[in-house]
Image: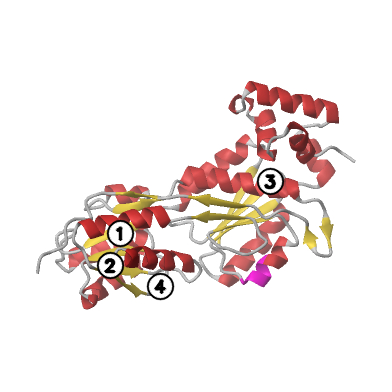
Amino acid sequence: MAVTIREVASAAGVSVSTVSRAFTAPDQVQPTTRQRILDAATKLGYSPNPAARSLRGGGTGTLGLIVPDIANPFFPPIIKAMQARARQLGYTVLVADSDEREADELAAIAAVSKRVDGLILWASTLTEDRLHELAGRMPLVVVNRHVPGIPEVRISLSAGIAQAAEQLKAYGHRRCVFINASRAELSRGKSIQESFEALDLSLSELGPYEPRFETGVHAATLVAAHDATAVIAHNDLVALGVLHQMANLGVSVPRDVSVIGIDDTLLASVSTPSLTTIRIDPEEIATRAGDLLIETIAGATGRTGAGLEVTSPFVEIGSRLIPRASTGPAPVH
C-alpha cells in the first residue's frame, strides 16, 4: 500500500494541508515544521508527486465548487481566492452555478462530480437525505448549510449583526425591516431577529424573496408600509436595489431611512451613498473551505456500503460591521 499524505501528517503531528504546503509552497511553512514533515515523509517512503498520487488513487487533482449565483459580486473574490489556495496545495478548482434551483444544483453536481476529488456546496438547496447520499459517494463540504455528519463551514453573522443593531439603536432607530432573500439560510433571519430584540428594536420581515437587485427594488416600496426607519438586507445586492428605488421614490438615505447590507462587496464602497454593510472576508472563507475539503479528501479511508468514513469537522467564519454613509440618525417625527 502506498503511503498517504494523511499518514505523513499524523507522523509529523500536523494537518494534511500543512503537509501539502510543505511540498507545494515551502516558504509558507516554518522551517522546523517543514523539516519534521520531510523527515516523516522520508521515513515512511512518501512520494509527493501529484501525478503519481493521481495514478495510485484515481484522483483528479481538482476540487469542485458549486455556488448559488456566480453573477453575485460576493462570489468572484471567493472563487479567485480559492483558486489561489488550491494552487498552493497542488489542486485546481472547477466552478459551477446552481442558480439557486434544486434541479440546476443536481445537474451541476452530476456534471462536476466525476471530474473532481471532492465538492464544496454553497448554501445548498438539496434535502439532508440527498446531501448524505452525496457525502456517501464522495468527499463533501457544505458552506452556510448545517447538515449533521457533513463537514461544514459556517459564516457567523452574530458579531456583525450585533454591531449593526447597536449602531441603529445609538442612532435612535426603533422600527426596522429585514429583507429576507433566502429559503436555505434560515439561521440568518433568526440571528438578526434575536440581536434586534435583545436591544428592544422592532423588526418586521419581508420575504423570502430571491437574493437579487430586483428584490431590493420591490421591497423598498413596502418599507414605508411598515413605518420603518432602518432596513437590513439579506446581502449587498438587495441593499443596492433598496438604495436605487429609494432614490426613485424621493426618499433620502440616510436622512429618511438607513440601509445596511451584508457581504461587503466592492459595489458597497462605490454606491451612492456608500453602503454600510457587514463584512465577510472572502479570503478567509476560501482558505478555510479549501483546506477543510482537502482534509476531508485525505480523511476518506475507503468506500463501503455506508459511504466514506470521514470525520465531520466544523469551521466558523466571523463578521464585522463596516460603517459607511447609508446609515445615520433616525428621522424626528
**Few, some or many residues within 10 Å of mark 2 (<14, 14–19, 20+):** many
Residue at the extreme right = 1
Residue 247 placement: quadrant: bottom left
Q: Which mark is residue 291?
A: none
Residue 260 placement, left or right of 304? left
Question: For the residue marked with disc 2, what is the amino acid?
Answer: Leu
Q: Which mark is residue 165?
A: 1
Provide residue 284's location: percent of width, then percent of height.
Answer: 50, 44
Foreground residue, 238 or 141? 141
CB-based contact (under 8 Å), mark 2 and mark 1: yes
Rounded to the nearest angstrom, the CA distance separating label 4 from label 2 is: 23 Å
For the image shown, how many numbered marks are present on the structure? 4
Residue 47 placement, left or right of 158? right
- Magenta stretch, residue numbers: 127-131
Rounded to the nearest angstrom, the CA distance separating label 3 from label 2 is: 42 Å
SS class, disc 2: loop
Q: Residue at x 74, y 48 (%)?
A: 299
Number of the front mark, 4 or 2: 2
Label located before the other in sequence (2 or 1):
1
Q: How is the image coloured?
A: secondary structure
Question: For the residue marked with disc 3, what is the amino acid?
Answer: Glu
According to the image, label 2 marks what residue? 201
Please state, as top left, top right, bottom left or bottom right, where the N terminus lies in the image: top right
Residue 254 placement, left or right of 96? left
